Structure formats: C-alpha cells, structure tokens
Image (cartoon, rainbow, N blue to C red):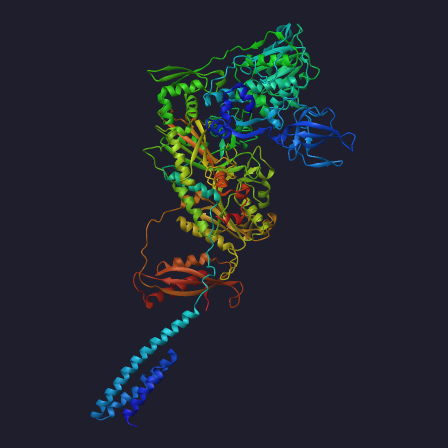
Amino acid sequence: MRVSLKWLKEMLPGIKEHYADLDNFVYTLDMTGTAVEAVETAGEALEGIVVGHITAKDKHPNADTLWVTQVNIGEEEPVQIVCGADNFEAGDKVPVATVGSILPGDFKIKKSKLRGEVSMGMNCSARELGIGADADGLLILPADAPIGMPFASYWDMADTILDLEITPNRPDCLSMRGIAREMAAVFGLQQPNFDGSDSGIPNSVDKVEANVRQSEKDIHSLATVTVEDSSDCPRYAARVICDVTVGPSPDWLVERVEAAGARSINNIVDITNLVMFETGQPFHAFDLDTIAKDDAGRAAVAVRRARADESITTLDEVERKLTPENLLITDSSGPITLAGVMGAASTEVTEDTTNILLEGAVFDQVVTSRTSRGFQLISESSLRFERGVDIENTILALDMCAELITKLGQGKLTKGTIDLYPNVYERRTIELPLAKVNALLGTVLDLKTCEETLRKLRFDVVVDEDAKVLSVTVPGFRDEVRRDVDLIEEVLRLYGMENTPATLPGGRERIGGLTHNQKLRRKLEQTLRTQGLFETLTLPFGNPADYKKLGVQPRLAQLHNPLSQDQSVLRAQLLPNLLHSVALNLKRGTRNVQLYEVGTVFESAEGRKQPKEAEHVAAVLCGAWNKRSWNLPAVEIDFFDAKGIIETLLRELGIEKARFVAANDEEYPYLQPGRIAELYIGGHVRGVVGELHPRETIAFDIEEPVICFELQCKALYKAAKDLSEVQMPSRYPGIEFDIALLVDDDVSAEGITQRIESFGKKTYLSDVRLFDVYQGKGVPEGQKSLAFSLSYRSDRTLSMDEVEPQHEKLLASLQKATGATLRS
Amino acid sequence: MSTLDEIERLKEQIQEKIGHAPTLDVLDKERVDLLGRKGALTALLRGLGNLDPEERAVIGKAANEIRAAAEALLEERKGELSAQALDQKLAAGRLDVTLPGRVTPLGAQHLISRIRDEIIDVFAGIGYSVAEGPEVELEFFNFTALNHSIQHPARSASDTFYLHDLSGDTHAGSEPSEVVLRTHTSPVQVRTMQHEEPPIYILAPGKVYRRDAADPTHLPQFTQMEGLVVDRDITFADLRGTLDYFVKEMFGKDRKTRFRPHFFPFTEPSAEVDVSCGICDGSGCRFCGNAGWIEILGCGMVDPEVFKHSGIDPNVYTGFAFGMGVDRIAALRYDIPDIRILIDGDMRFLRQF
C-alpha cells in the first residue's frame, strides 16, 4: 500500500508533527505492525530547480528564434540563460533549472554556449518539469513567487510516499481512511470522522462547485439488478450518473492516483480509483447504454456464477473460458464483468460514454480470489475483495464516488440507490477477560490499559469492573478480528512487544536432546568427514533423462508443476545430482573431488498418496586425495578407497553383520562390470559401491574415473550397536608367520581369509591379515599370490614348539580345501 | 727391556692411543689391542705368573693400576666420543621445520548443516528434541491444519509444488492435488501435537520447497528450522526470552533482538524478529541496508485453530512457535552474494569450512 503523507496529512492534520522526524515515524510504524518497506520522496527529482525572476530579455545576436535572458535566481549575480520560448516578458517569474540539476528523463543541465552566447541553465515549461502537458512555453509563475525558492516546495510537490506492507489481517489498511485511523491510534491523535462523504478532493483544490447537480430521473427506471446467490455477493449497490463528459483528469487527480501507484486513464476511472484508495471500496463503472435492456427499458444486470460453456473477453483483450467457479456480472447478452476482477470491453466507459452505472459491491473473498488467481488477473480491486471489504461502508463510499463523478464529469446524479443487502452485517461482540490477556502475554496489564488501547483502535468497549472482563464490539472494517486472541494481539502491538518481560519457560517434564538415530546420523557424517569427504547439498529434484542415462527405471515421483523438465521429478537416488557436481568441478578446473550427501530419496507407489521417502548417504570420489606435496605424492583414488570408507563407517557404527558381495553386473548398468560390490547387512542389500561405467562418465561430461557409493541410512542405524563387552588384550607377545599362497585367479581373497580363520579357530591363531596381492613374474599364468601374516597368541607366552605344529596343520588343511599351494 | 719399562711404555701408549682415539671404532680397536684376549696388557698380566713373588707383587700392582687407569680412560674417551658423535648426528638431522606437515585429508560439513546443528545444539541445551516429518506432505498438514484459509495465495500452483496423487482419490479443490512438497517445516508441528502429549519442546529442521526459480537470492528448495513449545502457562514473554537467549547464543552476547508485530495464519499474536546488525552494531550500514537490524525469523503464540486441528485443548495449554531460514542465516552470517553456491558442490567453496 502506497501512502502519500501529503494526502494523509489532509485527513489527519496532527500526523504532520510525527512524520517530521521521519526515521522515528517509520520506526514506530514498524514496531506497531505496519512495516515500512520503502520510503520514496517525490519532488526530490526536481532538486536544483528554483523560482527565477527574468530581469532582462534580449534578442540573441546570432539566432532569430532565441532569446538571451538575465535571470535572478536568488544569488548575488543574475545568470545568463539562452531561451527559445516566446511566451514571456522581462519581469516574469519562471522555474529555472540551474547548472547541475537533472530534469525528468535524466536530462542533465550543463553550462553551455548556444550560438556563441553562454547559457547557465534553462527556463522550464510545465512539460519539461514533468508536472503537466503544456510544452508551448515557459511556465509563468505568479508574481509573488519567492525568488530562489526550490520549485518543488513552491509548487507543493514535495511529498513522501511510504510503501507499507499490509498484512492479510488488516484489509482496512488498504485504504487511506484505514491508515489514518491506524495512525491516529498509534500516535494517540484524535480519531478522524469519516461519516460524511465529502472528501476525495485535496484541500488545496478550489471546491467551487460545491453542489452536486441532480437529475430528475430515478435509478430504478434506468437500471435493475438481481443477485443469484447472496453468499457470493452479500451486498450489491449502484448509482447512475447521467450526461457525463469523459475526459482527462485535472492535475490534482492525476497526481493523487499516481501517488497511490495507479496510472491516470480518464476522469471517471481515476475517480473510481481515487475513492477506492481513500475508502477501500472497489468500484466498477459501466457505460449504462451498452448494457442490454429489459422490457421496461431498464439496463438489466444479474450477478451470477458462470455457466460451463461461457467465455468473456476482458479489457486486456484476452478471451477467457469460464467455469462455474467464476462469479460474473451479466446482462441478457452474457458476461460483462468478472466480478471484482476485470470488466469487458463491451461495457467499458469510453470517450463517448454519457451515462454511467456505478457499481459498489462486496464479493465473496474466496470466489474473487479463485477467479483472479486462476486467471492471474490480480488488480487493486481483486486484492481488496480477496482480503475483505468493509460491508458497512459501501453506500458511503458509493455516494462519495458518484458525487465526485458528477462534479468532475459535469454530469447529473440520478435519484435513488440500488442496494441489494439482504443480510445486514451484525457487529460481533467478543468477551475478553483481563486474566486471559495477561496469561497469554506474561504481562500485568490493568483493565484500563486494555480498554483504552481498544478504544483508540475504534472498538466499542464495555467494561465489567467486577468480573474484570471487557465486552468488545468490532466495527465492520475490522471484521478479521473474531476471537479474544485477535484482541489480545491488538492490545499487545500498541502496548509494545518490547515492553513485555522476557522469560524462559519453566517446564517441569522436559527432556531434550537427539534421538538415537539422530545421534547416529551425526556419527555417520562425522566418520565420512574424518576420512576426507566433504558434505554437499544438491536440490532434491531429479531429471528423468539422468535415470535413463544410468539405465535404471525407478518409480519416479512426478511433480504437477515443475519449474523445468530437468527438475520435473523428485530424486530416486542421490547419485545423479552428485555426478552433476563432479562435472561442475571438473569444468571449473578442480580435478580432485570428494563429496558426500545425506538426503531424502523418493519413490512413488501406486495406491499411495505420498511417495515413499528414505534417507540415503552417497559419495562420489574422483581424481586424487591430495595435490602432490613435497613429502606426499598425489594419492589417486580407487575402488578400495570407497570400500574402505564404508568399512570404517561400519566399524564406527558398530555394525558387525555386514559383508560385501561381488554384484551381478546387470543389476547396476551404470557401474563398471567387475568393480561393483553390494553391501549386505543381515541378509539384505543395503547399498552398493562401485566405479562408474566409462560410458556414464561420458554421458555426465566427466571423462575421469569416478568411484561412488550409495547406502540406506535406516538400515545402518538399525544395525548399529554400541560396544557391549570389552576384551582384555593379552599381555604376552605372540608369534607371527608370513605365508604366501598361490591360488587360481578367480578365488576371492575373502574366501581364503575366511578359510584361514575357520581352520584357525581350534588353534592359537588370533589375527589374519592380507598384506600382499601379487601377479606377474614368478607366479604361474592364471594364478595369483596372496600373502598373509598370521599371528598366534595366548594368555601366556607361547613356545615355538606349541605353535609350529598348529601352523603346519592349518596350512595342510588349507591346501587340501582350496588347492592353494605355499609359494616358496 | 724390563717388565717395568714395558709397563711404562704401555702407560704412555694408553695415554696416547686411547686418550686421543679419533673415533669410537678406533677406540674399540685400541681396547681390543690392549685389553682383549690377545691384548698387550692382557698378555702382560698373564705373564705375571712366571715372575718370582716379589717382582710379581710390584709389577702386578703396577699392571693393575695401569689396567684400572686404562679402563677409566676408555670410559672417559668413550663418553667424549659418544657425545661428539651425537652432536654430529643431531647437526646432520636438523630440519627445515617451516616445511609443511604431512596432512591426512579431512573433509568438512556443509555450511547449512553446520548452522542447523549449531541451532539444534543451542536448543537441545534448553531441553528441546528434534522432530522430523515427510518432505512430501498433504495439503491438510501443510495448509489447512495451520489455519491457511482456502483462498490463501500460498496454496496456488504458482507458489507451491504439487505431486501426482497415486491413491486413486479424486481431488475437488482448485489445486492440482492434495499432495504438496512442504512449503515449511510447520506440518511437523501438527504431526507432533497429534501424536504426543504436552509438554512439547521441539525443533523441526528440514528441507522445504517454494516454487521460485533459482537466482542469487532464491532457491526452489531451502532449509528451515521450526520450533514449537506447548505446555501449561506458556506466554509471549517466554517466547521473547527464548528467542533472546537463542540470538545471544548464536550470534553473540552483544546482539539485541527486536520484535515487530506481524501476521502469520498459524500464530496469534505474531511477530517478526530482527537481530541487531553485527557489522554496524545497529547504527546502520550497507550490510543491513542501513536499517541497523536484520530480520531473521517469524514467530508467535500458537493459534487456537491450530490446536484444534492438532487435538490439543487450548483451554489447558498455550504455546509458541518460531521459524527461520537456515540459508538466510548462512547468507547473513557469511555475506554470501549468490546462494546458488550452496547447492552446486564446488569443492573450492566446500573446502573453506
């Protein structure tokens, strides 16, 4: 809501003293719930333009059409200005743009020479100052204009416009009158009286034509209105003005509607806007003669819902298909207005219009909102209907508007008013116990403070001193106030939120902190970070094309109204978006990428409203762990880094029953065959680690090997165990043997290790560690050498004689079972 | 040459060779030459048995003296040479300690998560738990239960993402379906109140969605943090005190808060909270747009309508709720000119934290 302080001052003269200190004024508004979003100072643009007195006017020696003038601008010496206008004489007073000033249109005034004569500024026309259309000559000012006075203040142009944020619970503040009432309450001023309709014209404008010319005709012989359903349109009022002249608006009207943020169209439209800005009541002006007539020759208007097959061509020349959701003003030919939203060209007021049907109605909030938002036609009018219009104010505002149209349009106001208002608004009365105020706010306010505050805000208050209860009656313009808490808010905001105490709640049964899973999530992420992974966040949307590239077909959750095709679903895996992050890093010249993300993935399911949500953790690794350093070469990342990270994670979370299994390549078409391991926990696949298929790296613009994993968090949390018992380490040294076994290529390291462990169970074997894998010289084709370090240990010092036979026996059974031979 | 002469000669030799042995190796060789099995002094001492008793006493004494002296000298020289050797070793072992150390790669937490956890820790310290809920919500929890009127603009498909409803239910309203990407974490409030008895002290952090195309100040998904307290005798003063405490913990003891009346459908009374600008300390600067204050959250007393939808008796309990954008706090705290950096995974950005 744009509020001109110049306008406000006319309605509430006392406000002047308060906004003189603008910073403090704005602060007070902010702190009472009317947030000031911007402060605009009109007239500032005319800085450097002053009232000048032309003391001499001489022919330009070198140009027939130019004059050389000497102008007193209130400085010691007059300045010389070359001028092309003819409509002035020496002795006239005119607005002068001095050197350095900027005229509207970003036209900067510089010292110049015109045909050899110095010119130190410019004598201005009204057009050049942007204050009128007259470009024919200089704007000649009255003789008493003070020389040197800033023109903006002389012309009373200086105005400050506040852009106020009006919250949805304050529809009354979408009007100058509402703002004036609010400010009177906030600043403790006498409430203005808005009972009369004689307003809208600024005090500065000569109100000669005080009388409104009356017509002999009666509205009821000219127009008739029916309302199909009064819940859609609880009040429909109208007046008719005859013999109107439609034309441009006077300057004061243009200035005013523009200050409020509207564009000047013609006198009729401008007046309806002016009165809407002042009272909050939107209007629609019809050309009476274009409305279809009934048998009695009356323009017959019906307010009704649209039928399914109807359409309307609105003022913006768009044909709109209607549905029964839309409320219309119609005549027998069909729709003539989208009620409260926009009219149709067929009944619009034009230059040729002489008779006007002026509508002032109240339309249902939801219906208007649906229509205006549905068609994306949001206007000052629809916005007010959507928020709620004061139904008690309709006639007052309608009369004011009709009278102004009559005056400025030089028309005649017909007798009578149409007013369809079957259910007269009943003001509600709310009981407000003082105890409740203080109980909710934590304050110790007394009855008097609450009473006075509410009275200031124009509520009617009856006090029950004994029961300490206020009976508060709500005026129509504050219809949004419906419950005691709404009143408590009113008391609080004027009392000042800053004036309430600040305490901490003293709940007795309160136990806070993180849940088990939340703690595990922190531990999981911490473990990834200590292993060199950086957390990232990606948008949880997905691109169906990405999943196609990966060769997988998850059941993607589709958005109805995505912003774009590449964000048209919710992600089913974390991987694709992380791959885009890898590509972005490479493109920006970062080759070493170590990213992880913990986030929700989505999978839709037939028969379910909401998709299934699951928390995943995923990582992508690319390049090396580090840039090479003086004491550490770049350590390239491979499959076993990722696997090792997961192994560490399992250890940190205390997950024992987990194992990796070489996956079926076809299950993961986006991973490189033979480099895919599934993580099994308790017999179920809970994740996968692998190297991205080279085909996929190309598809995602990566061109570098990428190692990735993605795991299901819930399964990890579920399997996590706290350490339950501690094993005391032996205090005695053990005996170690290193063995190298030759096995066939396809024998897995895990298989051999498990064999050793199982054979070792009956021995003193306590630790098995694979320390070398070798293929090449010295090892037969098709075989590999696996070297293990075996450690035997007991709770006493073992002798070689005890261990050696066990070791020999273990080797023998190993050879027998796996065909592994000892490599010499 | 008499034996005594020989002893005398050995004595000089000991002084000369042991006392001046240049290295530990030479010293050891001299020790072997003198005291070893075939050493000169050993031989001499072994020859004592062939002497007559008188001579044996004199020479034996001299020889033993010499042996004691030699051993002492050996020890002394050994000490000297060891010290020298250590000095040399240390001198050779000097490092340029200004060379960078060998660093184990260490990752970092994302800025948003870090701030989220910081906030959680502040409130966990005063007895709050963390509650979670689905990111895909039903209209009821996201809007209706939170007292959003049926015509509330936030419900429109231009502001909120809607999903296909696969349940087979038909949807009557003007919106595409009743399944939305939650626009705030407030639905978690309702879900919590429906399932738990007061006292309730929770924080609900999480991802939320608004239908804004990504630009320097907007993302279609960002992170919000919501708080809810429902208990007996909860007042607006408690809300003020709680947020004041939070701001001081989070931003510093010197920071002030300011409550401005505002409107939210799910709280009444409602307020917006500003924190004094940390750069200019409230006097106004470029950072705070000359206001001296920076808006960080919205809050208010839980609206009775919300209690009604959540099965809480507003005559017994009162409560407050507050919500803030974690991204906004991050952008404010670190003066981030383009918040898209938060979601693109640029390692150079992530390594800073």
Q: Residue at x 45, y 49 (%)?
A: A528
Of residues A180 and A668, which is closer to you in this image?
A180
Side of A679 where A357 appears, left or right? right
Relative to A247, A19 lies left or right = left
The N terminus of chain A, quarter of image: top right
Q: Residue furthest front?
A: A76
Classify residue A58 by image quadrant: top right
Q: Is residue A390 above or below residue B310?
A: above
Depicted A763 relative to depicted B202: above or below? below
- Name, please, the residue furthest toward the left: B54
Q: Eyeballing the image, is A671 above or below A338?
A: below
Look at the image and tell me in which quarter the C terminus of chain A lies.
bottom left
Q: Residue A315 at what x, y percent from top left?
A: 66, 21
Estimate the x, y position of residue B305 in percent, counting from the top left: 43, 24
Camera-nearest residue between A186 and A89: A89
Point out residue B78 in the picture as x, y percentages from the top left corner.
34, 77
